């Protein structure tokens, strides 16, 4: 990028044009294969030590939406969008690292001798620190959701990330495991007219420091 110029390509344009959708076409649906593809893209996001400590619950049937809506502040996106994902982060458990790294070893990406070189420091970093385990669960889920948000935009779909829900009730109603944190809801679907363009952001000079 030259001084005074703006970077432009399809990915950047997608990011710069995205805005949280308020209005969805309630008659539009996504197939299970389309939902799987969104999650496949989401799980290409980075995770610490390749833990991949996330899970996505796709709330897409009328019955499931009716269960989620009252514990999500009756936000219209839950019922109107094609699908609302309950994006879950899983508390870090470093004992799964050998299993998660096995495909890398099998593919020749990582030598087998390197696996304990990842597992041991990860154990020291996380397992005695409950807050770090939870913080990483939230980071992981957020990375995955972000990838899905921009993938949806690139496919001409709207998205709405939401933290307006009763986490304990979601945990109970949808059978989350004890080690799972419902980090956010993410509605995705076809938009209808009336949604805003991306809102102006704070100047870069206000948020960037050079050192």
Image (cartoon, rainbow, N blue to C red):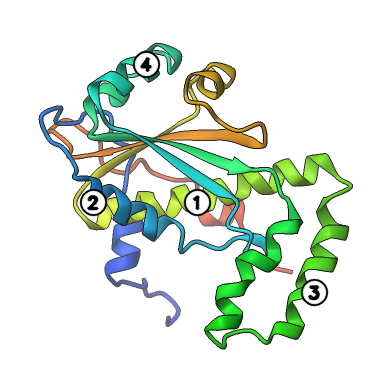
Give the residue at mark 1. 203
Taking the image as drawn, is residue 16 in sight?
Answer: no
**Contact (Cβ within 8 Å) of mark 4 with mark 1:** no
Give me the residue at 55% from left, 24% from top.
171
Residue 22 vs residue 58, the one in the foreground: 58
- 63 versus 96 height, above or below: above
Tell us which disc is closer to us: 3 or 1.
3
Image check: 70 left or right of 181? left
Q: CA distance from mark 2 to mark 1?
A: 37 Å
Give me the residue at 55% from left, 48% from top.
54
Residue 134 in the image: state x and y as whole percent.
72, 41
Lower position in the chain sequence, tag 4 or tag 1: 4
Residue 180 vs residue 18, the one in the foreground: 180
Give the residue at mark 4. 67
Image check: 119 left or right of 33? right
Give the residue at mark 2. 34
Q: CA distance from mark 4 to mark 1?
A: 41 Å
- 191 versus 41 height, above or below: above
State which quadrant residue 62 falls in. Answer: top left
Give the residue at mark 3. 116
- 91 versus 62 height, above or below: below
Give me the residue at 22% from left, 46% from top.
157
Lower position in the chain sequence, tag 3 or tag 1: 3
Q: CA distance from mark 3 to mark 1?
A: 44 Å
Residue 6 in the image: state x and y as whole percent.
36, 71
Question: Dot 2: few (<14), some (14–19), or many (≥20) neighbours within 10 Å?
Answer: few
Residue 177 in the image: state x and y as whole percent.
60, 33
Q: CA distance from mark 3 to mark 4?
A: 43 Å
Lower position in the chain sequence, tag 3 or tag 2: 2
Classify mark 4: helix, strand or loop: helix
Image check: 21 left or right of 50? left
């Amino acid at each position: 990028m030259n001084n005074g110029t703006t970077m432009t390509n399809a990915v950047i344009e997608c990011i710069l044009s995205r805005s949280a959708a308020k209005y969805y076409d309630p008659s539009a649906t996504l197939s299970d294969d389309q939902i799987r593809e969104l999650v496949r893209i989401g799980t290409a996001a980075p995770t610490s030590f390749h833990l991949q400590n996330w899970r996505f619950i796709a709330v897409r049937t009328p019955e499931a939406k009716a269960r989620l809506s009252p514990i999500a502040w009756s936000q219209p996106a839950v019922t109107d969008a094609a699908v609302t994902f309950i994006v879950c982060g899983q508390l870090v458990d470093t004992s799964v690292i050998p299993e998660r790294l096995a495909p890398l070893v099998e593919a020749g990406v990582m030598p087998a001798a390197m696996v304990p070189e990842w597992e041991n420091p990860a154990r020291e970093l996380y397992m005695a620190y409950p807050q770090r385990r939870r913080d990483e669960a939230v980071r992981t889920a957020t990375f995955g959701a972000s990838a899905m948000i921009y993938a949806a935009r690139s496919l001409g779909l709207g998205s709405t990330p939401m933290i307006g829900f009763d986490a304990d009730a979601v945990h109970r109603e949808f059978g989350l495991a004890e080690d799972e944190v419902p980090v956010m809801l993410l509605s995705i679907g076809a938009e209808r007219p009336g949604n805003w363009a991306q809102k102006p952001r704070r100047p870069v000079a206000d948020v960037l420091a050079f050192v």
